[in-house]
């Protein structure tokens, strides 16, 4: 049976749609975090999703992830900016790589700036949901 040749444009448009979707969800993540909607961020994760912040045990599942996000907010983390630099996907899986900046308000009223990189693993389960998130700073440890 004859099957028409599928052009690269079709494949490219699927890639762009996935990339655009992931980029949009990541912006939803930072907006929700910055407005204190930690539950909304946690709802981006699968039921067994992992949130792996530096210097801390991983949190698994939306309720545990919401609590860790809330803890970060209460410790002064604010003005989170996420910039996606790369999205690779195949089928129902995608990996997102990017950079972040965040301000950390200190108890004495000063603010420290942090910057670094992140990686998010996504799975399409009808909608794209985060399976895992991890980040680390580009700055040396505070003394």
Image (spheres, rainbow, N blue to C red):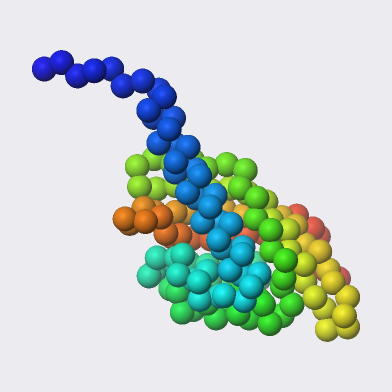
Q: Position of residue 109 (x, y in %)?
A: 87, 80
The residue sitting at 81% across, 60% down in the picture is 140
Vertical arrangement, residue 64 with respect to residue 79, above or below: below
The reply, left or right, for residue 24 in relation to residue 85 is: left
Q: Nearer the viewer, residue 41 or 98?
A: 41
The reply, left or right, for residue 38 in relation to residue 143 is: left
Vertical arrangement, residue 24 with respect to residue 50, above or below: above
The residue sitting at 80% across, 75% down in the picture is 105
Q: Taking the image as drawn, is residue 34 in sight? A: yes
The reply, left or right, for residue 124 in relation to residue 50 is: left
The residue sitting at 61% across, 47% down in the picture is 84
Residue 137: quarter of image: bottom right
The N terminus sits in image quarter: top left
Q: Nearer the viewer, residue 96 or 50?
A: 96
Q: Position of residue 116 (x, y in %)?
A: 71, 55
The residue sitting at 46% across, 79% down in the picture is 63
Q: Nearer the viewer, residue 81 or 56?
A: 81
Residue 48: quarter of image: bottom left
Q: Position of residue 28 (x, y in %)?
A: 55, 61
Total marks shown come to: 0
The C terminus sits in image quarter: bottom right
Q: Taking the image as drawn, is residue 60 in sight? A: no
Q: Position of residue 139 (x, y in %)?
A: 79, 58
Vertical arrangement, residue 29 with respect to residue 38, above or below: above
């Amino acid at each position: 049976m004859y099957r028409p040749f599928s052009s690269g444009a079709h494949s490219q448009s699927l890639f762009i749609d996935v990339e655009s979707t992931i980029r949009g969800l990541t912006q939803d993540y930072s907006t929700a975090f910055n407005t204190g909607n930690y539950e909304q961020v946690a709802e981006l994760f699968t039921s067994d999703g992992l949130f792996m912040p530096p210097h801390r045990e991983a949190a698994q599942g939306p309720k545990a992830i919401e609590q860790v996000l809330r803890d970060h907010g209460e410790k002064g983390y604010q003005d989170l900016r996420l910039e996606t630099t790369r999205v690779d996907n195949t089928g129902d899986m995608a990996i997102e790589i990017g950079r972040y900046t965040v301000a950390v308000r200190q108890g004495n009223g000063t603010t420290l700036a942090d910057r670094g990189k992140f990686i998010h693993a996504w799975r399409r389960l009808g909608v794209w949901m985060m399976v895992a998130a991890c980040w680390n700073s580009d700055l040396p440890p505070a003394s």
